Amino acid sequence: MVLPVTAYPVMGVVYLARNISVLGPQVLRSLAWALGVAVSTITPLIALTFKYQRRLISNVINSSFPRIAGTKILGVSIQTWSTMFLTMGESSFLVTVIMGEVFSKEKTKGLFQNVLSKNNVQIGPFAEITENGTIKVSTIQEYGPRDSRLQGVHHKNLEKVSTSPSHFGQRMGLWLVTLPLNFIPVLGPIAFCYINGKARSYHVHRRYFDMKEMTPPEREQWIKARKSQYTTFGVLAQGLELIPFLGILFGFTNTIGAALWAADLEQQQNELRNKKSRQSAKMSS
């Protein structure tokens, strides 16, 4: 059963806590590197730029939004909140640039795949219900047995990381362009998370699509049918990963959540394939 998409980021955290003995070494190895980079990045940012950025944001708010200039949230001024969001965005950007895709392979290939394997998920071909109500199952068969696809030892596509240099560059470009939105109180950080979260939503299940050997039109159709769900997941994941230090950990738990979501979706796919098999057997008898 597929749960509401908002549940999967939380399930990722719970799943990691329950399976820390299995997944811990893999996560901790990459997490240690990322935290080291984060500390060496965020500390100078706060020490050298926070005061000046707050002064700049205060000037923007006082001149453009005078009605909310004195607003406080949880006892903290709106100027300070906006500066904090801007600093978090800057630090996340720098950590991603410095780390590049160093631990992306661990997250998208190793971690995602380990979660599916641990839950005994067998990935099958793409199945869909057509406009006339019939079930259509992809006929691509060259990738071999399902088990070998899960283990990543049969088809060359499984050796590819689910991100590419062009995708990485596009994400970083969008991040950099939208970063100034954080100068705008309240709505700015929300818009920043939404725009970047929506952009990343198209890549949440790239590894899953690779394993199913779905064609570009099939992937587009799949995401289009679940557009709001993928956007919601992407925005939530983006917001969680902006939290200083903890955001790095959420990067891993979000990957686990995406894998758990894929497992539930594949259960639906399996039901469609079984139904198609029964229909075909009935027609041939």
Image (spheres, rainbow, N blue to C red):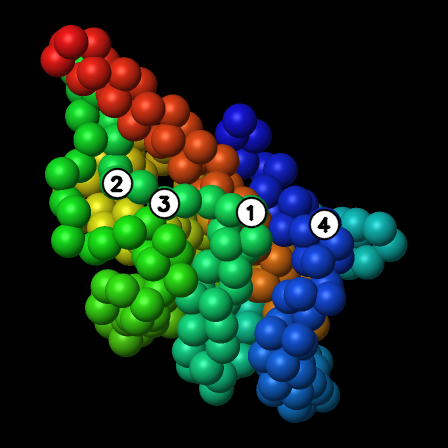
The numbered dot on residue 57 is: none
Q: Amino acid at mark 1?
A: Asn
How far across and down, in percent of the image, does residue 272 sit? 32, 24
Asked whether residue 60 appears in the rendered view, the answer is: no
Please report whichever mark, 3 or 4, sits nearer to the chain's N-terminal start. Answer: 4
Picture quarter containing residue 45?
bottom right
The numbered dot on residue 14 is: 4
Residue 166 or residue 273, whichever sits in front: 273
Location of mark 2 (residue)? 125
Q: Residues within 10 Å of mark 4 (few under 14, many from 20)?
A: some
Residue 235 or residue 133, whichever sits in front: 133
How far across and down, in percent of the image, does residue 131 sit? 17, 15
Picture quarter containing residue 221?
top left
Q: Amino acid at mark 3?
A: Ile
How far across and down, in percent of the image, does residue 84 sit? 68, 67
Marks 3/2: CA distance? 7 Å
Residue at 57% over, 53% down:
118
Please report whichever mark, 2 or 4, sits nearer to the chain's N-terminal start. Answer: 4
Marks 2/4: CA distance? 29 Å
Quarter of the image with the C terminus in it: top left
- Dot in front, 1 or 4: 1
Residue at 41% over, 28% down:
268
Residue 66 or residue 268, whichever sits in front: 268
Q: Amino acid at mark 2?
A: Pro
Marks 2/1: CA distance? 18 Å
Q: Amino acid at mark 4?
A: Val
Location of mark 1 (residue)? 119
Location of mark 3 (residue)? 123
Asked whether residue 37 appears in the rendered view, the answer is: yes
Residue at 54% over, 36% down:
5
